[in-house]
Image (spheres, rainbow, N blue to C red):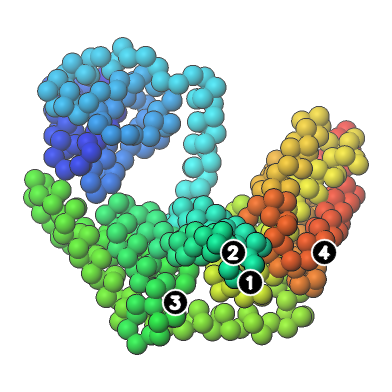
Amino acid sequence: MAKIVAITACPTGIAHTFMAQEALLQAGKKNNVEVRVETQGASGSEDTLTAAEIAAADAVIIAADKKVELDRFVGKRMLQTSVSAAIKEPETLLAQALDAPVYGDATQAYMDDIAAQKAAKNQGTPAVYRHLMNGVSSMLPLVIAGGIYIALSTAIDINGKASLAVAFDNIGGGSAFKLFVPILAAFIAQSIGDRAAFASGLVGGWIGTQGLMYNAGPNASAGYLGGIIAGFLAGYVTVGIRKWIRVPRTFEGIKTVLITPVLSVGIVGLLMIYVLGHPIAALMSAISNGLTHIGASGSIGLGLLLGLMMAFDMGGPFNKVAYFFAVGLLGTHTVESEMIMAAVMGAGMVPPLAMALSTFIAKHKYTQEERDAGKAAIILGACFITEGAIPFATKDPLRVIPSIMVGSAVTGALAMLFRVTNPAPHGGVFVFPLIGHWYLFILAILIGVVVAGLLVTALKRPIAQAA
């Protein structure tokens, strides 16, 4: 029996999406073809195709009038058509799909297989972390762009009257930084409850950042912590509403675009205003006040800890927590928050640069492939892309990871000791002109790179003796 998988999707995602699904399923039964259909309607994806189902399929039908991601179907025979064609001629489409051309090429299929393995590995991570990272990855462009424009505004300001400085501050602080927490909340909510949860997450995050909570002052803000809580609340409230409220299939579209968002926005909004917003804002205020009283010894210890976290998994959960902690505090506009950001950025630049140094001073301990990777690691490290050290850590984790952790910890502690400030959340060498005590920042990074580079070089064995 032939096996075909399909996706149906129309712009509104209410009626035609499900009519096409039903037509294809009925045609499959009639023609002895096993058909599985994923719908991408107004409420998001339903009956989502699994990797195993796609791998076992003989062909794929994409009956859609809007954009559908096709990467997971590389290497499969694929027929792309409209929703109306699936409704009117489902049997014809089944026959045509089995003779359709193969989508993608061998190289693309290989890359897709690698991506699938990574995705399978990520499935082992807790759902809460995956939801949080969906929000973080979506908000980071706003944080990075906003932070850099705020830093530029400060750098070119002349007695607070430079018009370009004011414009940059409006772009960064007045727009991007006001939006990043609501966007964080919205995409956390969407990860949990799909598109129906997006609106309530956005509204909950906005209420928390704008001081709209009951009995809270006009300058009170629940900050990024409020955004995280609002996002999870919105996602699970939406899931609950979808589960508890049942309507006939013909009214599913109305439920998705009217009933669910109205109820979830109201519930989340009221909870943020009357119940959660004020205590979260008070907690964020306490965190901000605590930062301003960090002593020199505490600062060094914090820098050391953040440095260890940045290098431990290079883009993994510990790295993201440290980075997100620093980025979230930038909104407090305190010297201490900028010191923390400097420590995190400096520590994150160390691992790739340290591995590059080691490949240059101990070529006999690395393959040609690793030496080439070392050259690329220089660029990645300079741009604050910690993941540049991953190829080395994957091949020799017991020697590489402890070494770079020590180097990053040294840089993080020194950056705090030197009271280096960094108002930009990303950029590496490109934002050095905006960094306070930039020469000491470079010194802290170089010391960390040398420490980690020499340590990993001492620990690694020549290729012939490697175990």
Task: Name which of mark 3 and mark 2 comes first in the sequence.
Answer: 2
What's the distance in space between the residues labelled 1 and 2, CA to CA? Answer: 7 Å
Judging from the image, what secondary structure is the residue with disc 4 in?
Answer: helix
Circle 1: residue type: Asn
What's the distance in space between the residues labelled 3 and 2, CA to CA? Answer: 28 Å
Circle 2: residue type: Ala
Residue 34 appears left or right of 307: left
Task: Name which of mark 4 and mark 3 comes first in the sequence.
Answer: 3
Q: Mark 3 points at which residue?
A: 221
The mark found on residue 162 in the picture is 2
In the rendered image, which quarter contains the C terminus?
A: top right
Is 241 situated above or below 362?
below
- Kindly tell me whether residue 410 is visible in this rendering: no
What's the distance in space between the residues labelled 4 and 3, CA to CA? Answer: 34 Å
Task: Name which of mark 4 and mark 1 comes first in the sequence.
Answer: 1
Which one is in front, 154 or 148?
Answer: 154
Judging from the image, what secondary structure is the residue with disc 2 in?
Answer: loop
Tag 1 and tag 2, C-beta contact below 8 Å: yes
Figure quadrant of residue 344: bottom right
Q: Position of residue 385 (x, y in %)?
A: 66, 48
What's the distance in space between the residues labelled 4 and 1, CA to CA? Answer: 27 Å
Is 268 situated above or below 76?
below
The mark found on residue 159 in the picture is 1
Task: Name which of mark 1 and mark 3 comes first in the sequence.
Answer: 1
Q: Where is residue 177 in the image (x, y as percent from the top left)?
A: 49, 63
Is 348 situated above or below 72?
below
What's the distance in space between the residues labelled 1 and 3, CA to CA? Answer: 28 Å
Q: Name the residue under label 4.
A: 440
Tag 1 and tag 3, C-beta contact below 8 Å: no
